């Protein structure tokens, strides 16, 4: 596990109701809120997050270039891949997770 994934998981440990468990759909680790999966890791530096189409649009987020797991994801999808390769990006990913939880 990379240091950035460890940092992200430490930040998320303080979010009430969020747990890290094996994903029954994607395999690997996933984030659950009150028993509902809302995110999963593609690898140690990328989280696939159900953020909602409205939030993705309002924050002007875009699907990352070179997506290996979802290269054909529709622009209107409620899911967004979030990559984190620095402490700043880890903080931003944690903020997006908190926003995602607020949508559930």
Image (cartoon, grey):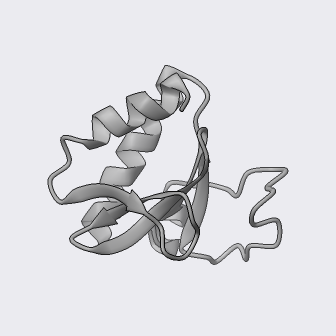
Residue appearing at x 24%, y 42% in the figure: 13
Q: Position of residue 84 (x, y in %)?
A: 58, 35
Q: How many marks?
A: 0
Q: Nearer the viewer, residue 35 or 11?
A: 35
Could you tell whether 59 is left or right of 69 in the image? left
Quadrant that contains the C terminus = bottom left
Q: Residue furthest left?
A: 16
Above/below status of 46 relative to 30: above
> The N terminus appears in which quarter of the rendering?
top right
The image shows residue 98 at horizontal and vertical percentages of 30, 52
Tell me which corner region of the image, top left, top right, bottom left or bottom right, holds residue 25: bottom right
Residue 7 drawn above or below residue 60: above
Could you tell me residue 72's position as x and y percent?
A: 82, 72
Q: Evaluate whether residue 54 shows in this view.
A: yes
Question: Which sits in the foreground, 66 or 31?
Answer: 31
Q: Considering depth in this image, is 62 or 73 the residue closer to the camera? A: 73
Give the x, y percent position of residue 81: 62, 56
Above or below for 51 versus 94: below
Q: Residue at x 75, y 62 (%)?
A: 69
State whether residue 88 is above or below residue 34.
Answer: above
- Point 74% across, 73% down: residue: 73
């Amino acid at each position: 596990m990379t240091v950035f994934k460890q940092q992200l998981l430490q930040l998320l440990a303080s979010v009430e109701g969020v747990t890290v468990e094996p994903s029954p759909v994607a395999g690997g680790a996933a984030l659950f809120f009150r028993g509902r999966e809302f995110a999963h890791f593609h690898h140690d530096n990328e989280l696939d997050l159900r953020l909602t189409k409205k939030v993705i649009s309002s924050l002007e987020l875009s699907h990352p270039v070179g997506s290996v797991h979802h290269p054909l994801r529709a622009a209107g999808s409620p899911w967004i891949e979030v990559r984190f390769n620095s402490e700043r990006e880890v903080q931003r990913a944690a903020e997006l997770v908190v926003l995602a939880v607020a949508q559930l």
